[in-house]
Image (cartoon, helix red, strand yellow):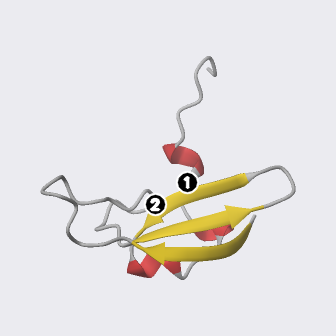
Amino acid sequence: MIKTGWTRISENRNGGKPARCVSCGGKGRFKVTFEDSFGKLIVTLCEDCKELEYEQLHLQSKLDWPGVA
């Protein structure tokens, strides 16, 4: 997948929990968009993980696939 863009998440989230990075668990500050010919993936990432490419992120272990042993 290829990184196609990102947007900054505002710090004030109406008193809710702060966003977390889906790769490392740090403080999520950015919504990053990855795309390929099959679809689009939008994930929340921290400052450091935002710079990495899709293959370098630890996303595959975070997905829950129901029915897979």
Q: Is residue 18 left or right of residue 63?
A: left
Task: Using the image as rendered, state which of residue 63 and residue 32 is in the foreground.
Answer: 32
Mark 1 to mark 2: distance in Å?
Answer: 6 Å
At x 56% / y 65%, what residue is drawn? 57
In the picture, which quadrant includes the N terminus? bottom right
Q: Is residue 23 above or below residue 68?
A: below
Q: Which label number is shown at residue 34? A: none
Which residue bears the numbered disc 1?
59
For this rendering, which residue is in front, 11 or 43?
11
Determine whether 23 is above or below 32 in the image: above
Give the quarter of the figure containing the C terminus. top right
Q: Residues within 10 Å of mark 2 (few under 14, many from 20)?
A: many
For mark 1, does the 10 Å Cα neighbourhood hold few (<14), some (14 to 19), or many (20 or more) residues? few
Q: Quadrant of residue 10?
A: bottom left
Locate residue 28 relative to residue 54 in the image: left or right.
Answer: left
Badge 1 marks a residue whose secondary structure is loop
Q: Residue furthest left?
A: 15
Which residue does the image show at 74% across and 62% down from the upper left?
35
Amino acid residing under circle 2: Ser
Expressed as whole percent of the image width and height from the top left, the position of residue 22 reads 43, 56
Q: Earlier in the sequence, mark 1 or mark 2?
A: 2
Would you say the residues marked 1 and 2 are in contact, meaning their CB atoms lie under 8 Å apart? yes
The quadrant where residue 66 appears: top right
Which percent across, then down, holds residue 3?
68, 73
**Left or right of residue 15, residue 35 in this image:** right
Q: State the residue lying farthest toward the top.
A: 67
Q: Which residue is mark 2?
A: 23
- Residue 53 place in picture, x, y as percent: 64, 74
